Amino acid sequence: MTKAELMNLVGKKVTVTFKDGDKICGILGYADEFSAKHNYIKLNDFYIGNMTFRVSHIKKAESEIA
């Protein structure tokens, strides 16, 4: 998974599978939004809820279609 592929999913409801097999579902955000909302700076990080992660931790991400 590349950063560009993940950036295309920002703002959408996704299921992210991490390399260790854990999964998380929710609205995908990017560090700029998170930093502004929570006064927290972690460049190049994505987030779902209050969990932040980097592209390198992700095995795959899929958009959920309602």
Image (cartoon, rainbow, N blue to C red):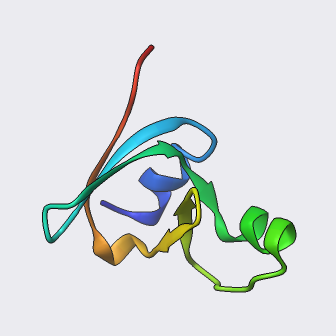
Is 4 left or right of 23, judged from the image as shown?
right
Residue at 73% from the left image edge and 86% from the top image edge:
41
Q: Position of residue 15 (x, y in %)?
A: 35, 42
Which residue appears farthest toward the left when viewing the image? Answer: 21
Is 3 left or right of 41, judged from the image as shown?
left
Q: Position of residue 51 (x, y in %)?
A: 51, 68
Residue at 67% from the left image edge and 71% from the top image edge:
31
Q: How many marks?
A: 0
Residue at 53% from the left image edge and 45% from the top image edge:
8
Q: Position of residue 58 (x, y in %)?
A: 29, 65
Residue at 76% from the left image edge and 69% from the top image edge:
32
Q: Compared to 31, does 61 lie above or below?
A: above
Is 18 left or right of 7, judged from the image as shown?
left
Q: Position of residue 21 (x, y in %)?
A: 13, 62
Q: Quadrant of the C terminus?
A: top left
Q: Compared to 41, does 4 lie above or below?
A: above
Q: Compared to 7, does 38 lie above or below?
A: below
Q: Compared to 40, does 8 lie above or below?
A: above
> On the image, which quarter does residue 38 sit in?
bottom right
Which residue appears farthest toward the front when viewing the image? Answer: 50
Q: Quadrant of the N terminus?
A: bottom left
Nearest the eye: 26 or 6: 26
